[in-house]
Structure formats: C-alpha cells, structure tokens
Amino acid sequence: MSDTASTTPERSARKVREGIVTSDKMDRTAVVTVTERVRHIRYNKTVQRAKKLYVHDEENDLHIGDRVRIAETRPLSKTKRWRIVEVLERAR
C-alpha cells in the first residue's frame, strides 16, 4: 500500500465574507447582506450583486447596521450555513 493512499486529503479553506447586518429579529440568527462588485462579462461594466446570508449569532449581540466578518460552517439549520468571526464596526 502506498503512503499517499493512506493520508487523508486536506480540507479546503472555508469561505470568509464581510457584510452588513440587515435583520436581527430572529433568535440567535441574523441576516447579513454581502455586496460584491463584479465586472459584467459582455459590457465590462462593474455591477454590484447582493446576497443575503443567514448567520448564527449565539449571544444575540448583533444589531442592524453592524459590519461583520462571517465564515462558512457546517449546516446549522435549513438555511443557516455561516457563523460570526468578528464584529468589524458597530452601528451608530
């Protein structure tokens, strides 16, 4: 048996995103809107695309307007697949 077959493959790096909290109404869950700037394939114009991600907020300490860094994690519920890494900026 070869040595390479017995070693386990390394896990790929988890995705990390930055976004703004848009909802904190749920218990231990926040909605974070992540906006990315992408160049349009045909027209070469920069376009903004927004995606809403459900984030696990264990202490319920996030509030609307907070800038946060989130990381991908195992499925925590039907829609929740992200967790908070750090709060970058609190809402004023």
Image: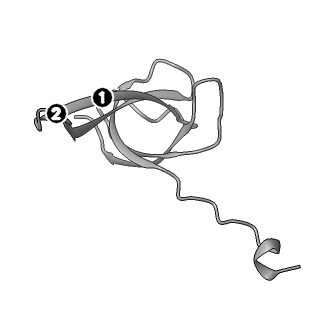
- Observer-side mark, 2 or 1, equals 2
Image-quadrant location for residue 35: top left
Image-quadrant location for residue 32: top left
Image spot of residue 86 (x, y percent): 42, 50
The CA distance from mark 2 to mark 1 is 20 Å
Image-quadrant location for residue 36: top left
Which residue shows up at 53% across the image and 35% down it? Answer: 57
- Indicate which disc residue 21 carries: none
Q: Residue furthest top?
A: 25
Residue linked to disc 2: 42
Q: Secondary structure at mark 1?
A: strand
Which residue shows up at 47% across the image and 28% down it? Answer: 30
Closest to the observer, 62 or 11: 11
Which amino acid does the dot numbered 2 rest on?
Arg
Side of 46 relative to 22 (left or right): left
Which residue shows up at 69% across the image and 65% down it? Answer: 9
Image spot of residue 34 (x, y percent): 33, 35
Residue linked to disc 1: 50
For the C terminus, the image quarter is top left
From the viewer's perspective, is residue 60 above or below residue 2? above
Image spot of residue 75 (x, y percent): 65, 35
